[in-house]
Image (cartoon, rainbow, N blue to C red):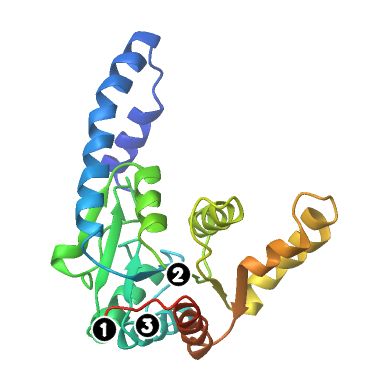
Amino acid sequence: MNKNNEDKIRKSLSPKNWGDIKATDSWQIFKIMSEFVEGFEKMSQIGPCVSVFGSARTKPGTKYYKLAEEISFKLTRSGYGVISGGGPGIMEAANKGAQAGGGKSVGLNIELPFEQKSNPFIDTDKLISFKYFFVRKVMFLKYSQGFVAMPGGFGTIDELSEALTLIQTNKIGRYPIILVSKEYWNGLLDWMKNKMLTEGNINASDFDYFKVVDTSDEVIKIIDEFYAKYSLKPNF
């Protein structure tokens, strides 16, 4: 981590008095509103898309990078746009595959003091940068007609949990949620069954909200079947 990043983090952690907090919060409302307005205006013009989540730390050429690239390529060839978090790793692979497939390649980038910067495979008119995670998350969920969760860390778990919660509570449509790699996700699913389900914190039917697959063809099949079932059409 370079000195500039360290300074930013140190500044963000410095104590503030209550007056400073109130003044800052008041002005933040306008910044938040501007991010929502820009996001709504751009995203509403893009059309049906599938969000691809995954780790920013996945290296090019590795198994999951190649698989995310392949999935996104096939999604765009089937007429769907692809939305990623706009950064490196799985996000880069998703945008790279979408661009190679001749489809819409959308990047919802987040400003961070380290790790993330936008990747070069996003359509120039479809890159949106956000300061606030929660605004960015709204764009993911509001404008996606499907969610593909590749292996990832806390951010991926956060996005996956948000999508599951909103579908479970009928706040968004029951769009397909697909977890890619049984090897990676089965440990989490076992914990859900052995702990969350056993303790009564979720219902057995909640497992119907998502599918776990290993191949790109399985992902496309699930998305296509969803669109056919509800007589929806992708971008063709």
Task: Calculate the distance from the C-alpha at mark 1 to the C-alpha at mark 2.
Answer: 17 Å
- Vertical placement of 198 versus 68: above or below? above
Q: Which numbered mark, 3 or 1, is in the foreground of this view?
A: 1
Q: Is residue 145 left or right of residue 154?
A: left
Circle nearer the N terminus (1, 2): 2
Residue 75: numbered disc: 3
Residue 98, quarter of the rendered image:
bottom left
Q: Is residue 191 left or right of residue 97?
A: right
Kindly identify the residue that appears in the image at 77 percent across and 54 percent down: 196
Task: Calculate the distance from the C-alpha at mark 3 to the C-alpha at mark 1.
Answer: 12 Å
Q: Secondary structure at mark 2?
A: loop
Task: Calculate the distance from the C-alpha at mark 3 to the C-alpha at mark 2.
Answer: 11 Å
Circle nearer the N terminus (3, 2): 3
Residue 236: numbered disc: 1
User: Counting other residues with Cα less than 10 Å from the Cα at mark 2, is it few (<14), some (14-19), or many (20 or more)?
Assistant: many
Q: Nearer the viewer, residue 174 or 146?
A: 174
Q: Is residue 91 left or right of residue 38?
A: right
Q: Secondary structure at mark 1?
A: loop
Residue 88: numbered disc: none
The answer to the question of whether label 1 and label 2 lie on touching residues, with beta carbons closer than 8 A, is no
Question: What residue type is disc 3 on?
Answer: Leu
The answer to the question of whether label 3 and label 2 lie on touching residues, with beta carbons closer than 8 A, is no
Percent of width and height locating residue 76:
31, 82
User: Counting other residues with Cα less than 10 Å from the Cα at mark 1, is it few (<14), some (14-19), or many (20 or more)?
Assistant: few
Circle nearer the N terminus (3, 1): 3
Residue 146: numbered disc: 2
Q: Quadrant of the C terminus?
A: bottom left
Question: What residue type is disc 2 on?
Answer: Gly
Question: What residue type is disc 1 on?
Answer: Phe
Kindly identify the residue that appears in the image at 40 percent across and 74 percent down: 59
Residue 46, quarter of the rendered image:
bottom left
